[in-house]
Image (cartoon, grey):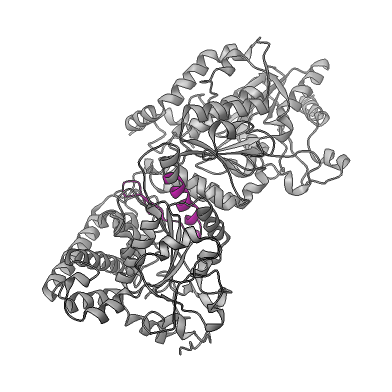
Amino acid sequence: MACSATAKIIHNPLVFSSSRSAEKYESCCKISGRSSLGSKFLGKKLLSAKSAISPASRRSGAVVAVSSDIVKEKKVKSGSSAASNLLITKEEGLVLYEDMYLGRAFEDMCAQMYYRGKMFGFVHLYNGQEAVSTGFIKLLKQEDCVVSTYRDHVHSLSKGVPARQVMSELFGKTTGCCRGQGGSMHMFSKEHNVLGGFAFIGEGIPVATGAAFTSKYKREVLKEDCDEVTLAFFGDGTCNNGQFFECLNMAALWKLPIVFVVENNLWAIGMSHLRSTSDPQIWKKGPAFGMPGVHVDGMDVLKVREVAQEAIGRARRGEGPTLVECETYRFRGHSLADPDELRDPAEKARYATRDPITALKKYLFENNLANEAELKAVDKKIDEIIEDSVEFADASPVPARNQLLENVFADPRGFGIGPDGKYRCEDPKFTEGTAQV
Amino acid sequence: MLGILRQTVVAKLNHALNCEQGIGAVALRAYSSSSANKMTVRDAINSALDEEMSADPKVFMMGEEVGEYQGAYKITKGLLDKYGPERVVDTPITEAGFTGIGVGAAYHGLRPVVEFMTFNFSMQAIDHIINSAAKSNYMSAGQISVPIVFRGPNGAASGVGAQHSQCYAAWFGSCPGLKVLAPYSAEDARGLLKAAIRDPDPVVFLENELLYGESFPVSAETLDSSFCVPIGKAKIEREGKDVTIVAYSKMVGFSLQAADILAKEGINAEVINLRSIRPLDRSAVNASVRKTNRIVTVEEGFPQHGVGAEICATVVEDSFEYLDAPVERIAGADVPTPYAANIERMAFPQVEDIVRAAKRACYRSR
């Protein structure tokens, strides 16, 4: 039972520790009247549903709650033998570990660089939430799209944007992935299909829905062979925003290939999720719009991966969207400027014991998938990559003067016609930054 | 640097360049068209949409009532039957949501045309127009361009009240990254919309509900399917030498009527149809002021921070010595639009207001 000194909130223990404790289990309920949506998903191997809700609201007929306890169940069943019962192979395990460690080490380096003055403005770090990014994004192809919020460094890294480019972007150098023009909150990469990086929460959700719309359009109208999926990442605060609901509606209505991933870290800057939401169980909002809503322990990368596999598979097969609520936590404040005074230290300590990287390490050791030396080698490799990215960013040049006016338009004639009657962009001085604008 | 820029521009914009060159060749003829063909603005927009959708399968329409209802103002009539519901998408009433979906689709390679039932409703989606459409090419350093068109009726209609009558030209016109167009005639509507759909950047296309039914003569060139009007160039609707009247959208019609009245009184007015609010054709306005030495700006929108204010600033900055009289600025009244017909009429510029202002500009130095 957690009581924070200042906020005086009694946190419902079910919400927090639900994934590990053996709570009430109940069988999955079909979404009423929408069996075509529900049955294929529920008919899959997964599992007994577990609901993290109080008994009173359990039996609302139109609710589907599925949570993945594969890890726990399989561990119980298989004991110490049979590698075939494991969720991941050694290679996959190392990939997951490497990606999560990359995310963590990168964000820690960001904090250092910020306090040394190399990075500036708003920087929002992802420490603690790595399991969500790794669990989902490592299942994607290059053509699949990721849309995120301002907490987007690790999503970009997981999707494949080189650490060098992300670090340079944060330093505001011209070698950054957006040539220094975007910054921490606006990571874009056409090559890796990272469609941003948005400062307004909720802004990315319709954009992601649009990318999913494109995928469906390409298949049905342009008759291309396209099964691209889009992932939209956003937080608990966003789930009270109108655009979220508008897009849940349209995505389900048009059966778009999208997965809505809620990174519920319980806090929107200093506003607790429980203080701001009438019904804090976000996964329930999916079935209200006709799509499955799933709750998963976001501190366990293997559980996230299982659910992700199912949701992404659904989208790829054309069965429509899924809403996945990942219960996770950010170890640092909202941003590097946030003094983080409202969160109870006991709550932070409790989540620190559930560190996703430590948990995965433990799993790998216990199941003999990797040993200490191999993981240390991965750590070393990543540390070197991060050091190199900092050196690279330091050594890179700042944008040249003429870059100020570049890329405002794809068609630079949009700057209009100058006093001499010709298009401004045809003036040789225009891009030198010396022409009058 | 410029060389690379130019090559990129040429490579990407061959199509648009071709159509601009085409216009260069026919521009003179278009001004003095003698064709007997007439076309309403509604048909002009409909035909432009039809031709662009047929030319490029990536173009699609999205908005409230654009499909089965044939368009709230019947602009998209017939398009659903021709192109099917995947390309003419009826949306729920979710401006923020569907505008964002359009932007996301544009990020990822399609060319959406998003209709707002009126631009007043664009305020519910303005975050997406500005933050995720206009700014994205810049924030992504050119990786993500947004070839989207936002269109719909703008400005006052008749008796629709304060929440349905605002003109958004000034608001959108102040945003870098956007192109803002305001057609007047059928030729403008057709040419500018085609240019807008072919343009790789976000374009806000401000139509006017009261102009939809008006007929204009159109030349054979206008009816050609590759017809385009260049973005950023104003049109001199009527040449003159005594005073310049600058307007856009419906006010061009009023200005032309005012010019006829002024001509009977011996004042030869030059009427400029801006066509493009952003980029503003400052050189055309200044060239005209240097010829006539007097200028009147006319707009429907609110006066403070309006398009007229910008034109006044540009004329004072570039052609101060040429001005023989202060800039006359006519705008809508600084009030939310009333409902009652008589005071609504007072809230927007009328022909007599333009005539009066032009006379003031001409007599002041005497």
Residue at the image point whose x is 38% and y is 79% from the top = A19
B170 w.r.t. A246: above or below:
above
Instruction: List the single residue furthest toward the top.
Output: B34
The residue nearer to you, when weighing B362 against B61, is B61
Residue at the image point whose x is 32% and y is 65% from the top = A135
Q: How many marks?
A: 0
Asked whether residue A180 is in view, the answer is yes
Instruction: List the single residue furthest toward the left.
Output: A373
The residue nearer to you, when weighing A59 against A347, is A59
Picture coordinates of residue B202 (x, y %)? Answer: 51, 39
B280 w.r.t. B134: above or below:
above
Q: Is residue B342 left or right of residue B178?
A: right
A30 w.r.t. B340: above or below:
below
Asked whether residue A418 is in view, the answer is no
Picture coordinates of residue A268 (x, y %)? Answer: 49, 71
Q: Is residue A138 left or right of residue B251?
A: left
The residue nearer to you, when weighing A238 against A84, is A84
- Magenta run includes residue A192: yes
Which residues lie in the magenta part? A187-215
- Magenta run includes residue A132: no
Q: Is residue A265 left or right of residue B330?
A: left
